């Protein structure tokens, strides 16, 4: 994953996981997201790029209704997960978030043991009936997050005692353990050093084989390296959305071109 | 705009005037701080030495120890008297006379004794088999003998009165030499109940310790769950609007309401309106709960606020409900702060006197321990600070020593509670 070359990647557009149409987000009176429509494909990485404050994180948090925790936040438009409206009255956001997992900017393991960190999701969702099943889930989640070999001998050690990169992979393992369909990542590498970043990026590519991954990033190189689809946000609007290769080599909108060549943002 | 010009270069080995001034200001500020701490420590030392010096006499007891044999005939005769305890007292005086080698009038011996007749009568009531057998009674001397042996009363300061005459002091010296008057550790002060106003030697704080314990039990059982639940609701679930703002302001104000106001509220609501028993630890506990709640709510909310929001996000992002996020992650992390606030609130309540005066928990209501475990809540009793207040207000100066001694016991309890708070905080503290 170390090469920065941009290659044309084939994406199966037929398999759409999340379908967002005309989404608007308001924080009180301010209009944070303006009429955004995006299709998130399954088994691929979709990157959201854009300058700070352009609304890409806000939009990401709409996809698993994390914005519900902010009382003044209001969302209009349709966001469909596998054809079902996630803002429907019948949807319990708690159930939704089990299907749409999230990894945050700053690694935030619980101040508990590594095992308990990963086992928390399966426990509250009742995914394991026996201790052996739980052990299996934890191991496979840690393996999937490429951290098993580093922590297998100290599962009882506190998760907060790991290094920053390990903590972030632990958080990814924790998100993976609840068996989500979609994995949202909000600048997962911004607090990590280049080596840890490379490990996490490699991991993202592997995760895309099983999940629809959406990643918000400040680093255009990162978007180019890991994603198949890229969305460029500016001032709350979606400026351009397309194949990553096309966005970085042949952007249609002059604003996208200015941003990726470093003139705005 | 004037162009910026670099000032001429100066050696960094030379300290310029501005830096000197700054360093001087810093040194001054440190000196002020040090002076403040020294002054504080000095007053603390003065406070503790005064309390211990004045309070220690309460823990020793000057007692008159004499062997006495009560014949069945005497017992029957005393029980027939109108003043039964007086009759027993006379019998004891006679027993002292028997062992005395110097001449003394009965009245003089009487003056040296506390009101001991009741103790003797109670002893034979409990052990009727001892009638006719010899038994060594160790009974309180009068408070003036106490003061004489403690050095508070001297031959020079003594004023002849019906309580004590100069010749009595010779008698005391003789009795001390004979080993009849002796100083012993006063277990009765720690375990006993309050005595009558004329018997300071028999006064103990034990019953009011039990009263305080029952009150604290009520306070803990009510204020901790209510306070923590209210804080969790306000901090994690309640919408932010004018109404919750109003509640918040009112809770902060409640913490500053004088305790006597809570006392009169308790009197009006719990006793006059709800007809709960007067002077009962249950009512005292309810009043103190009202007082403690704001303290617990404020400290619990501060502890909940201090938990990083990333922990809540992490739990919610995994599909935990809000309640799960709070009870699985936020509350355990806030626990040290909650415990500290609770114990500070309890310590405050333990030392509170004013509201207890209004609901009738002043001293001299409990002559003994509560009869049953549950009766401890409803039977009239006192609490430590109220007992101390009562003693300090009594005429006999020997009660003054008792008040200081009571303060030592109260402080010991507070120190224990603080140590418990520190230990609990250490145990629950986790880093993230």
Image (cartoon, coloured by chain):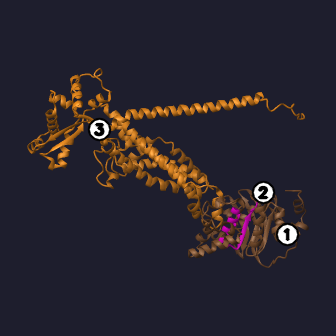
Q: Nearer the viewer, mark 3 or mark 2?
A: 3
- Image location (x, y in percent) of residue B206: 33, 45
Query: Could you tell me which chain the residue with mark 2 belongs to?
Result: A
Vertical comparison of B246 with A81: above or below: above
Q: Which residues are magenta?
A: A166-189
Q: Is residue A251 visible?
A: no
Give neighbour class at mark 2: few <14, some 14-19, many 20+ (Cα, 10 Å): some
Q: Nearer the viewer, residue B342 or B283?
A: B342
Vertical comparison of B368 with A131: above or below: above
> What element does badge 2 sit on?
loop
- Image location (x, y in percent) of residue A200: 75, 66
Q: Is residue B163 left or right of residue A76?
A: left
Mark 1 to mark 2: distance in Å? 22 Å
> What element does badge 1 sit on?
helix
Question: For mark 3, what is the residue?
Answer: B184
Vertical comparison of B378 with A203: above or below: above
Q: Is the same chain shared between marks 1 and 2?
A: yes
Badge 1 vs badge 2, beta-carbon distance below 8 Å: no
Q: Is B172 part of what is drawn in magenta?
A: no
Kindly give the residue lying farthest to the top in the view shown.
Answer: B156
- Image location (x, y in percent) of residue A147: 70, 67
Q: Which chain is brown?
A: A
Question: For mark 1, what is the residue?
Answer: A244
Q: Is A169 part of what is drawn in magenta?
A: yes
Q: Is residue B195 left or right of residue B16?
A: left
Give neighbour class at mark 1: few <14, some 14-19, many 20+ (Cα, 10 Å): many
Q: Nearer the viewer, mark 1 or mark 3?
A: 3
């Amino acid at each position: 994953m170390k090469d920065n070359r941009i290659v044309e990647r084939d994406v199966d557009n037929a398999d759409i996981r999340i379908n967002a149409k005309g989404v608007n987000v308001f924080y009180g009176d301010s209009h944070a997201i303006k009429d955004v429509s995006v299709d998130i494909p399954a088994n691929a990485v979709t990157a959201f790029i854009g300058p700070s404050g352009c609304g890409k994180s806000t939009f990401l948090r709409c996809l698993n209704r994390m914005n519900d925790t902010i009382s003044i936040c209001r969302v209009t438009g349709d966001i469909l997960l596998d054809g079902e409206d996630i803002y429907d009255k019948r949807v319990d956001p708690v159930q939704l978030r089990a299907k749409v997992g999230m990894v945050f900017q700053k690694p935030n393991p619980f101040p508990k043991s590594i095992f308990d960190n990963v086992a928390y999701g399966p426990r509250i969702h009742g995914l394991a009936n026996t201790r052996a099943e739980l052990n299996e889930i934890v191991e496979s989640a840690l393996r999937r997050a490429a951290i098993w070999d580093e922590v297998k001998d100290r599962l009882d050690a506190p998760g907060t005692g790991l290094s920053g990169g390990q903590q972030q992979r632990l958080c990814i393992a924790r998100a993976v353990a609840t068996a989500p369909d979609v994995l949202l990542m909000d600048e997962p590498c911004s607090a990590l050093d280049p080596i840890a970043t490379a490990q996490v990026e490699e991991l993202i590519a592997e995760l895309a084989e099983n999940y629809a991954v959406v990643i918000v990033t400040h680093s255009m190189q990162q978007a180019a390296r890991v994603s198949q689809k890229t969305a460029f946000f500016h001032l709350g609007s979606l400026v351009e959305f397309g194949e990553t290769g096309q966005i970085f080599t042949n952007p249609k909108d002059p604003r996208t071109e200015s941003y990726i060549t470093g003139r705005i943002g | 705009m004037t162009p910026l010009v670099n000032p001429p270069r100066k050696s960094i080995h030379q300290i310029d005037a501005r830096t000197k001034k700054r360093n001087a200001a810093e040194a001054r500020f440190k000196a002020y701080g040090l002076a403040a701490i020294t002054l504080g420590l000095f007053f603390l030392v003065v406070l503790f030495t005064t309390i211990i010096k004045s309070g220690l006499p309460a823990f020793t007891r000057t007692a008159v120890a004499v062997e006495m044999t009560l014949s069945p005939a005497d017992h029957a005769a005393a029980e027939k008297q109108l003043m039964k305890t007086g009759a027993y007292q006379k019998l004891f005086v006679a027993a002292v006379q028997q062992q005395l080698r110097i001449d003394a009038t009965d009245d003089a011996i009487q003056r040296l004794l506390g009101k001991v007749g009741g103790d003797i009568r109670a002893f034979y009531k409990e052990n009727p088999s001892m009638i006719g057998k010899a038994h060594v009674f160790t009974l309180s001397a009068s408070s003036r003998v106490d003061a004489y042996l403690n050095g508070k009363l001297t031959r020079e300061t003594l004023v002849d009165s019906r309580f004590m005459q100069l010749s009595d002091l010779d008698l005391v010296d003789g009795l001390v030499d004979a080993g009849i008057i002796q100083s012993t550790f006063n277990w009765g002060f720690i375990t006993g109940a309050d005595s009558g106003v004329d018997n300071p030697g028999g006064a103990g704080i034990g019953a009011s310790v039990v009263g305080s314990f029952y009150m604290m039990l009520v306070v803990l059982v009510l204020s901790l769950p209510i306070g923590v639940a209210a804080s969790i609701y306000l901090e994690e679930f309640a919408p932010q609007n004018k109404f919750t703002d109003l509640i918040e302001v009112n809770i902060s104000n409640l913490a500053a309401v004088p305790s006597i106001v809570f006392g009169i509220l308790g009197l009006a609501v719990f006793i006059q309106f709800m007809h709960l028993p007067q002077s009962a630890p249950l009512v005292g506990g309810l009043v103190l709960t009202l007082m403690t709640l704001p303290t617990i709510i404020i400290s619990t909310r501060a502890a909940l606020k201090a938990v990083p929001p990333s922990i809540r996000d992490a739990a919610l992002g995994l599909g935990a409900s809000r309640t799960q996020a709070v009870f699985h992650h936020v509350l355990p992390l806030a626990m040290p702060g909650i415990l500290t606030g609770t114990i500070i609130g309890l310590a405050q309540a333990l030392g509170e006197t004013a509201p207890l005066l209004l609901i009738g928990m002043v001293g001299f209501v409990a002559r003994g321990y509560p009869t049953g475990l549950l009766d401890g809540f409803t039977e009239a009793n006192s609490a430590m600070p109220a007992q101390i207040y009562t003693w300090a207000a009594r005429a006999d100066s020997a009660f003054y020593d008792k008040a200081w001694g009571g303060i030592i016991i109260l402080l010991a309890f507070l120190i224990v509670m603080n140590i418990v708070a520190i230990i609990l905080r250490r145990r629950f503290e986790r880093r993230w």
